[in-house]
Structures are given as C-alpha cells and as structure tokens.
Amino acid sequence: MDRAALDKQYNLRQAVPGHLDDFARWRRMSDAARAALPHRADLAYGGHPLETLDFFSVPQPGRPLIVFIHGGYWQAMDKADFSFAAMGFASEAAGHLANVAVINYPLAPAVRMDRIAAANRRALLWLWRNAAELGADPGRIYAMGHSAGGHLVADAALADWRALAPAAPQNLLRGGLAISGLFDLRPIQQCYLNDGLRMDQPEAERNSPLLRLPFAPRPLVPMALAVGERETDAFHEQQSVFAQAYHAAGGEVMAITEPHRHHFDILDGLGRAEGSPPDGLRGAMLRLIEQSGDE
C-alpha cells in the first residue's frame, strides 16, 4: 500500500466517527470501577513519571494476576481510562477471579519505541517481584492489551526474561490476550503514525513481534488474539498473519473475531461481570488461565 492507503487503514478515529462516545463511556465505566473496587493507585515501577500502575486486588490471597496494557498508538491515553478492565475479573460479581493491574508507560514523541517496550517489560518484572506482597501469585501472571497494548502483550510474550533478570522464570508470563493487536510495525513506520513515533526501519523491525518470533525463547507462551468484525482490513491481516506464524512456530494460539464490534467497542465486555460461562474477551482470558492449569 502507498501512504494514503495505509493512513486510511490505520486512522481508526476516522474509521469510527463515534469514537469520542466510546472514550466517554470508558471514562464513566473506569470512574465507577475505581469507586467500587479496592485498589492501590500510582504504584511506581520505574523512574519515569508515567512508569506507574494501579493494582486492583481481590480478597483471596494467591489468585492470578492479569495485567492490562492500554492502547493509544503508543502516543496517547492513560491507565485511568481503562480501570473498567478490572470489573470483569476483580469484582465480587465476577467471583473475584483475579487481581488486575492496569499500567501506564512513557509515550511518544517524548520517548522512542525501544523505551516504550522496555518500560512495559520492566512493569511486568516489577509485578512479578512484588506480586506476593500485593496478594497475587507471582507464578500466575497473564497480560492483555488493546491495540498498541496488544503489540506490547506480544512483545512481552516473546521476551527472554532470564536475560533481563537472571532470577526471573522464563515463563514469567503464563499467557497473553492481544486485542486488536499490531504485530508488524513496518506499515506503521510507513504511515502518518510515524510522524510522532519517529521509527526508522531497523527500529520498526526489531520491535515487530512477527519478525522476532523465530528468535524467541521456547516454549512459546499460549496466546489469544481478538479482532472486531468491523475493524479495518489491516487489523484483520495483522491478526491473521501473526496467528498463522505463531501456530507454525509451535505456539498455542486462539484467533477470535468479535461479531459486530469495531476497534473501540470491542473492549466493552471487559467492564461487565455478568455471563456464565463468560464469553467474548473475558471468556478468552479465562480459557487461557484454565489451559495453563491454573484454575
């Protein structure tokens, strides 16, 4: 595709004219979640002002920990916009299934993609080191993320944790759910988004999970990938190509298309605890936990 075609495929606010309504709904749901759920806010996992997280705890000690990584094309949004993701797992109505951490990370253009990915991995290492003190099981950490957060989930799934911290287990991350994820950053480097990201080609390549996959430690982390039926062709292709490559590399992967959903309302189900058995994204995450033998 030329730049104009790529811009059209990846300009999601243009593709979803009502996106401001989605953002407003997320904020209302997140305000309600923070009012309803016990949590510790703004825990620092690094030295940058945005290297912080909110931790939503459940009463039972030793439950799994689900880490939510927000989107915003690595340039926007805040963890406070996504507190609602905790409702589907940490609330009483959800059966206090898991603790939930919602993280922030430094944003472009202030920092480059290498720094963003490194901060995300640093957050997961901090949570592993501090999970027991926070009441969670450090051996049962899962990640889920949306859009740019989906990219960071896949990046973390391929991390060599022992190279980053010799005491860390190689299976520090037990599973990942990438929602509307981006796994090949070469098209991003060639479209309007790169005006803020400022990636050169080597940077886009080394931060592309699709291209890192052949060199990742084995065994691969079980993954679930979800895309909305109404998303652009580029997002369907990102998921399809990565799912096929992940499977071919020997990884367990669930590829899901959420009916009638676009890039933003695909997240709505995370803010609801009803549903037995849970369906949609909540169901996918719980299947990951069950498949790893944790429940």
Image: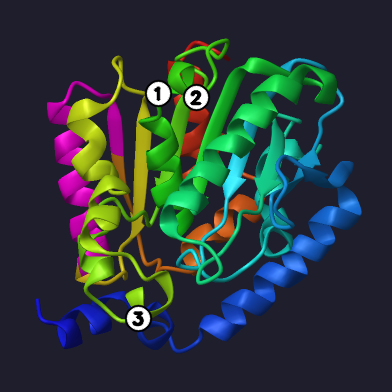
The amino acid type found where label 2 is placed reads Leu
Quarter containing the N terminus: bottom left
In the image: residue 15, left or right of residue 247? right
Res 23 → quadrant: bottom right
Q: Do the residues labelled 2 and 1 touch (CB within 8 Å)?
A: yes
Q: Nearer the viewer, mark 1 or mark 3?
A: 1
According to the picture, the residue beneath numbered tag 3 turns out to be 11
Kindly state the secondary structure of the residue where label 1 is placed. Answer: loop
Where residue 127 is drawn, which disc sits there?
A: none
Q: Quadrant of residue 175?
A: top left
Disc 1 and disc 3: Cα gap in Å?
A: 33 Å
**Distance from label 2 to label 3 (Cα)?**
35 Å
Residue position marked by numbered label 2 in the rendering = 164
Q: What stretch is highlighted in magenta?
A: 234-254
Marks 1 and 3, the one that precedes in the sequence: 3
Q: In this view, does 122 lie above or below 2?
A: above
The answer to if 236 sits in the magenta stretch is yes
Q: Is 215 in front, or is 152?
A: 215
Hey, which quadrant is residue 124 in on the image?
A: top right
Percent x, y for residue 272? 66, 52
- Magenta includes 255? no
Query: Residue drawn at (55%, 14%), measured in percent from left and top?
Result: 168
Q: What residue type is labelled 3?
A: Asn
Judging by the rendered image, the residue that carries numbered circle 1 is 160
